[in-house]
Image: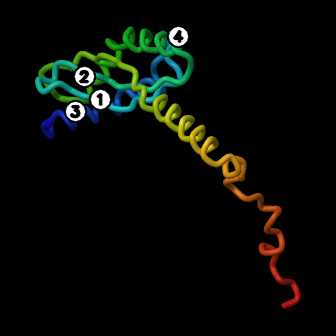
Amino acid sequence: MPSRRTLKAAEAIREVVASAILTEIRDPRVKDVTVIGVEVTPDMREAVVSVSVMGEEAQKQLTLHGLQNSAGFLQSKIARRIDTRYTPKLRFELNRGMENAMVVGELLGKIRREKDPEDAFEPTDPSPAANDDDTQPNEDA
């Protein structure tokens, strides 16, 4: 179990990196990035930053390369924020959780359609036009 100190450092690193990606990094390769989380080693010498990147696989790899090239800049921002003997060396990795969730959703939808084709085409959100009589205020009263 990580210590309270490493958890606090990880959260501070996540905040600094996420903010810098949004407002300060000017690298055109770094876009559509969400910082998911940070794991810091117990000796505080390395931090693995988990990111989610929207786009094709080539775009994701290009973005990771851009982030790794920006690591020195980000480490200097982190050094100003956290008070430790060593500033953790940053390593970026793709978090594929969102991709996996979309694949599972598609598979569940496919199974639902195969199991009961009639239910697959029912709208999940009824149109407001169907309930016009119920939503109108009574002007006779």
Earlier residue among tags 2 and 4? 2
| Mark 1 touches mark 4? (CB < 8 Å) | no
Residue with the mark numbered 2: 47
Name which residue lies at 39% across and 8% down.
69
Asked if residue 48 lies left or right of residue 107, the reply is: left
Q: In the picture, which quadrant includes the N terminus?
A: top left
Which mark, residue 9?
3
| Mark 1 touches mark 2? (CB < 8 Å) | yes
Camera-near label (2 vs 4) is: 4
| Mark 2 touches mark 4? (CB < 8 Å) | no
Q: What type is the residue that disc 1 sits on?
A: Val
Q: Position of residue 34 (x, y in %)?
A: 45, 29
Instruction: Compare residues 85 and 14 and report the one nearer the observer.
Output: 14
Camera-near label (1 vs 4) is: 4
Earlier residue among tags 1 and 3? 3
Name which residue lies at 59% across and 41% down.
109
Direction right: furthest residue: 140
Q: Is residue 105 above or below residue 135?
A: above
Direction front: furthest residue: 115
Earlier residue among tags 1 and 2? 1
